[in-house]
Every structure is written in structure tokens, then in C-alpha cells.
Image: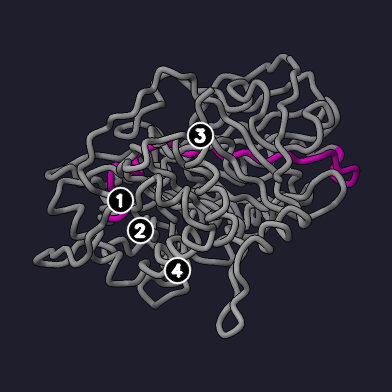
């Protein structure tokens, strides 16, 4: 059904400069800013790798992408100065940013490889990715470490790779894309971002007194009885227009209401297939979590807000029931998960974080899907045009490896489709 991607087996050498700290170009407020109770849940405490591949652009000859990016970064940090600070942890594990302008890590590099050698289609997993986003010793932590690392790697064809490692407690996918768009605008000579950044993290803090008003099956205390003796492998699958059309036809047509969305049918299809492949005992519980952003659903957060503003409403069923029933059963559960993401639901999650000590998500027999097709990563143009690939570099969110991303992508034929970035055991 989907077109699986076989990673290209290439080797190349990357010569990196010494990592340096880039601070805001102008003085910024020295203050401590608290994160919201949605920001500092355990599930957000990881670093998200993002990667963009840009081809050679003749009109940009003579412009060094690394130097363009470095200069623009210092200017962008004037507006997004919390990124240049360091996280501290207070009472009740409450996270806050010490806005001390210490700076973010920047690395420029050169690789003896051309963009075309990464193959077609250009999608994860990428060969030698650890060379394209170097893990600087001492920077891997969440607390008291740089909140952002950027590496710009020039390719011998004239193109370049922009890779970033971003502390997810500060921003969700839409917030990260907003920051990168600001960076791109300033790289193209803008004086300030077109969308002014908004902090206002108190908007998503717990109520006083906090009160949990939903079940929140995503945070259930479930014994982890899974065996992890296998090796975790990252992979991706491309669903083009023909594949998506065929999947849509597997589901019942609604003659009297809204039609099924591509996200709904693709999620239901993959979840059921994934559960069948796992060969679980029929009575074992399985969970689906759909990452749902509350932006646009209410006036809860204003335009320009770049913090985490999403929740993971979980639906639960028995493995045997999911596998035995039609795809329509899985579809209804997907729709139920989406419908749960209300303003009251996110308020209840914030309250739960305070009451229960910021628990992590249930990972055992769980699948989480995050749709970043509308985040706008592909539209980020530093002056070299649109990226050939743009978005998360691999599956998983921190230690939660059972998470997939849906990413917009164009294949070698010029067909628009969706790349599912996933991880599974071999």
C-alpha cells in the first residue's frame, strides 16, 4: 500500500568548526520566565531534531549559508531571547527559563557529499545523521544546558543542510516553525519578525485550585510489560495520492455528514495494521494518542504564542477488538480522540500535571501520531528557496519511541503526499 523507503548507503566526511555560543545581537531583559504547566510535563522534556535540505541556488552564489544563518540567529534571538537562556527547576519540578543571554550553540561544517547522493525520495532516516547534527558533549541535558543547537553543513554541490536540536519544553511544532520563519525572514534582511513572539505562558497554567475533569487515559499508571529485547529501527513510508485514495475507499462513505479527513483514515488504517503486526494477546489494552493543538479552536492562546499548546487525548480498546472489527471501528476511535481536545480538556491536563507531579505518557502498547503537515516547515526560506525535505528528522518523542509524524512531502514524480516517520522493532 504505502511506498517504503530504503535508506541510501553512503559514507561521507564532515569537517566541523568548533561549536560556539551565539548570543542575542543586542541587550535583552535579564529575568526569569516560568514555563506553563503544559510546557513542563515529562513528555516535553526532550530535544527534538529538525532537518532541512536545501539545493544549490545559482542566484545565491557567493553567499555563505552558515554566515547568513549565524548573523540572522543573533538578531532573531533579540526577539526570542528566552531561547538564549537556560532552564532551571524549582519547587514541584516547575520549570523556568533564566534569561541570561548565554546563547545557543552554533556549528558550521562542510561535507564532501552532494545533495543528490542522499537519493530519491529524500526522507528519513538520513545516513550519517549524527554527523549532520553533532551532539556537543555537555549539551544533551534539559536543565542548565543550551536550549537550541544549530548546525549548518555546506555540501559540495552548493546546497546545504540546516539541522537543529530544540528543547521541546519551550515550543511545540508550530512554535518551532514560527521561530524558524522569523529566522528566515531576518536572514532575508527583515528588521523584525512578521509575527511578534508572545510568551504569556501563564495562560496554560493550572487553575487555583486545580481540578481534573477528564479521565486522561494517556496518563494512566499502567505496568510496562513489554519486552524490549529487539533493536529499534527508524523508517519512513510515503503515501502518495494513489495510496491515499485507495485507503479512503476502505472506509464507509458518510452521506449525511462531514467526510472523513485524510488524517483520520490514515491514522485508523495504520493503527489497526500496526496492532495486527504486533500480534498482541487479544485482551491486552492498546492506546491511540492523537496530538491535538488548541490553536485556532479558541482564543485560549493569542497569535504569536510559541509555547506548547497541545494535548494527547488517548482512546483505549482491546487489541483483539481493534483487529477483529472493521476499519470503521478504528476510525470512530480516531474521531473520538480528536473531539476530546477542547479548552476544558487542556485545562484539565494542566491541573493534572500539578496534582500528579507531571507524569509521563503511557508508553506500553501505545501509538502516538503527530500531524505536522500544517506547521509550515516546508515554507521556511532562508533565501535559497523551499527545502527538498523539511521537518522532524526521526520518529519518537524523547524516550517515547512509539510516536510517528505525518509530514508533507513531494516524491520524485512531483506528487504531493504524506511521509509517515516511524520507529519499530526489528
Above or below 91: residue 141: above
Is there a contact, CB below 8 Å, between mark 2 and mark 1?
yes
Is there a contact, CB below 8 Å, between mark 4 and mark 3?
no
| Foreground tag (2 vs 4) | 2
Asked whether residue 108 is drawn in magenta, I would say no
Q: Which residue is mark 1?
A: 218
Q: Which residues are magenta?
A: 38-61
| Residue 22 appearing in the image | no
Q: Which residue is mark 4?
A: 295
Q: Secondary structure at mark 4?
A: loop
Identify the residue shown where x is 64% and y is 60%. Answer: 250
| Foreground tag (1 vs 4) | 1
* Quarter of the figure that contains the C terminus: top right
Q: Earlier in the sequence, mark 4 or mark 3?
A: 3
Q: Secondary structure at mark 1?
A: helix
Decide which of 404, 317 is in the foreground and name it. 317
Quarter of image, res 152: top right
Q: Which residue is mark 2?
A: 313
Q: Earlier in the sequence, mark 1 or mark 4?
A: 1
Amino acid at each position: 500500500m504505502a511506498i517504503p523507503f530504503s535508506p541510501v548507503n553512503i559514507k561521507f566526511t564532515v569537517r566541523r568548526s568548533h561549536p560556539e555560543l551565539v548570543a542575542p545581537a543586542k541587550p535583552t531583559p535579564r529575568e526569569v520566565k516560568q514555563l506553563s504547566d503544559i510546557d513542563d510535563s515529562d513528555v516535553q522534556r526532550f530535544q527534538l531534531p529538525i532537518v532541512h535540505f536545501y539545493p544549490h541556488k545559482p542566484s545565491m552564489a557567493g553567499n555563505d549559508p552558515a554566515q547568513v544563518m549565524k548573523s540572522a540567529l543573533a538578531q532573531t534571538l533579540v526577539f526570542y531571547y528566552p531561547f538564549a537562556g537556560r532552564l532551571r527547576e524549582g519547587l514541584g519540578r516547575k520549570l523556568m527559563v533564566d534569561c541570561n543571554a548565554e546563547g545557543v550553540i552554533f556549528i558550521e561544517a562542510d561535507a564532501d557529499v552532494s545533495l543528490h547522493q542522499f537519493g530519491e525520495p529524500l526522507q528519513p532516516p538520513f545516513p550519517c545523521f549524527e554527523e549532520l547534527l553533532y551532539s556537543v558533549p555537555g549539551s544533551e541535558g534539559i536543565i542548565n544546558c543550551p536550549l537550541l543547537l544549530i548546525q549548518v553543513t555546506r555540501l559540495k554541490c552548493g546546497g546545504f543542510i540546516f539541522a537543529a536540536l530544540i528543547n521541546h519544553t519551550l515550543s511545540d511544532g508550530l512554535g518551532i516553525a514560527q521561530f524558524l520563519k522569523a529566522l528566515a525572514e531576518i536572514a532575508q534582511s527583515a528588521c523584525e519578525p512578521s509575527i511578534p513572539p508572545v510568551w504569556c505562558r501563564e495562560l496554560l497554567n493550572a487553575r487555583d485550585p486545580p481540578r481534573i475533569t477528564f479521565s486522561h487515559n494517556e496518563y494512566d499508571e499502567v505496568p510496562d510489560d513489554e519486552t524490549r529485547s529487539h533493536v529499534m529501527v527508524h523508517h519512513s513510508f510515503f503515501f502518495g495520492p494513489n495510496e491515499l485514495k485507495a485507503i479512503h475507499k476502505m472506509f464507509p462513505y458518510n452521506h449525511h455528514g462531514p467526510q472523513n479527513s485524510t488524517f483520520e483514515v490514515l491514522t485508523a488504517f495504520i493503527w489497526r495494521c500496526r496492532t495486527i503486526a504486533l500480534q498482541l494477546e487479544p485482551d491486552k489494552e492498546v492506546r491511540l494518542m492523537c496530538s491535538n493543538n488548541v490553536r485556532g479552536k479558541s482564543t485560549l492562546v493569542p497569535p504569536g504564542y510559541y509555547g506548547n499548546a497541545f494535548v494527547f487525548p488517548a482512546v483505549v480498546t482491546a487489541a483483539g477488538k481493534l483487529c477483529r472489527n472493521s476499519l470503521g471501528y478504528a476510525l470512530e476511535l480516531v474521531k473520538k480522540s480528536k473531539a476530546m481536545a477542547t479548552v476544558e480538556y487542556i485545562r484539565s491536563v494542566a491541573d493534572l500535571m500539578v496534582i500528579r507531579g507531571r507524569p509521563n505518557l503511557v508508553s506500553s502498547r501505545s501509538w502516538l501520531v503527530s500531524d505536522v503537515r500544517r506547521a509550515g516547515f516546508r515554507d521556511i526560506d532562508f533565501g535559497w528557496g523551499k527545502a527538498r525535505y523539511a521537518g522532524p528528522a526521526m520518529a519518537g518523542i524523547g524516550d517515547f519511541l512509539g510516536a510517528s509524524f505525518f509530514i508533507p512531502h513531494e516524491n520524485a514524480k512531483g506528487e504531493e503526499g504524506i511521509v509517515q516517520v516511524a520507529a519499530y522493532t526489528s
